[in-house]
Amino acid sequence: MFHVEKITSFDSPGLQPYATMRRPLEQERQGIFVAEGTKVVRRLLESRFDVVSVVLPEKWLDEFRPLLEARPEQIAVYLAEKKLLETLTGFSMFQGVLAVGRIPPPCPLDEVLSKSPRPQLFVAVDELANAENIGALVRNCVAFGVQALLVGETSSSPFLRRAVRNSMGAIFHLPVVELAKLGHRHQFTVKPHAVKLTLAECLKQLRGRGVRCIAAHPRVENKFLSRADFSGDCCIVFGSEGDGISPAVLAACDEAVAIPMPPVVDSLNVGAAAAVFLYEAARQRGTA
Ligand SMILES: C[S@@+](CC[C@H](N)C(=O)[O-])C[C@H]1O[C@@H](n2cnc3c(N)ncnc32)[C@H](O)[C@@H]1O
């Protein structure tokens, strides 16, 4: 179901999320995210995620009509020319197709553990800040059969606009266990459904349930990827762009494993490292 409104100004309150695209934390607090581009918006409309609104130039309406008609919820469709949208959002755009969706409640850890078939494969991120890197990692997770992503308390959300864009919509197919963010004075911020454990505590719980936690860590001698065993239940942990995995999280893992590299290269981009690790895990499980 949808209703169409042709806009020539930005007065409608429904357009407010598009005007706050430069304020991603505000959107996260409101429990919404922005999807950009025809492919990602199409994938959002094909997904089970709640869609709030779509804005697009009139020439795209017929193409999106069947998907909009198939949706159970009421969606506001705003027709606007690309130039007007660029003024509203402050961004130059290729296609001028955008949508706002609702961030689903994070999955409870217990539910993910009990519902994921064995051998289980999870990924955790520690202190990962860059939205584009998270998006690329999410895309790799879905490509290689990861069953859930654990987002550490100091990592950025995979629902930031640039993360959703870089995931190419793969985020619509990956259960996310979000650990509550640490706010001022290191108290957990109150967010319904977010797991109030640190990533280190969460990994210890996984290990207690028989899930092997493997740190992807470039500064390891003697333990290279080709010798690691990913055939059982496991969670692969990736670290931040600058400092890598924090000492507490590293200590909470069963082992650390490196992709061997020559001395002139200290590490790979985290998205590239995730692709290499997850391909190896999928290969060992016979799914690659
Ligand atoms: C850019 S790297 C971090 C580099 C950081 N200076 C360090 O030494 O850990 C970001 C993340 O990608 C993964 N990574 C990158 N290169 C890797 C490698 N050669 N072996 C294992 N993991 C790697 C790790 O999880 C790392 O924390």
Image (cartoon, helix red, strand yellow):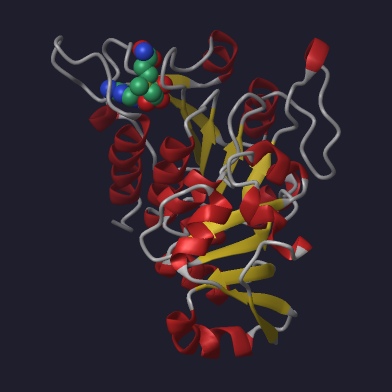
* Residue in the picture at 67% in, 27% down: 153
For residue 74, side relative to residue 89 (left or right) = right
Query: Would residue 174 be visible to someone looking at this image?
Result: no
Residue 231 location, quadrant: top left
> In the rendered view, would you say 136 is above or below 154?
below
**Rendering coords of residue 62 (x, y %):** 47, 89
Q: Quadrant of the C terminus?
A: bottom left
Q: Between residues 127 and 110, which one lies in front from this camera angle?
A: 127
Q: Between residues 77 and 126, which one lies in front from this camera angle?
A: 77
**Rendering coords of residue 64 (x, y %):** 50, 83
* Residue in the picture at 53% in, 90% down: 66
* Residue in the picture at 46% in, 22% down: 240
Residue 48 location, quadrant: bottom right
Q: Quadrant of the N terminus?
A: bottom right
Image mark count: 0
**Ligand 1 quadrant?**
top left
Q: Between residues 131 and 271, which one lies in front from this camera angle?
A: 131
For residue 284, side relative to residue 176 (left or right) = left
Kindly give the residue lying farthest to the front in the view shown. Answer: 8
> In the rendered view, would you say 141 is above or below 218?
below
Residue 225 location, quadrant: top left
**Rendering coords of residue 52 (x, y %):** 70, 68
Q: Between residues 102 and 90, which one lies in front from this camera angle?
A: 90
* Residue in the picture at 83% in, 18% down: 187
For residue 130, side relative to residue 99 (left or right) = left
> In the rendered view, would you say 200 is above or below 93?
above
Query: Would residue 276 be visible to someone looking at this image?
Result: yes
**Rendering coords of residue 149 (x, y %):** 56, 43
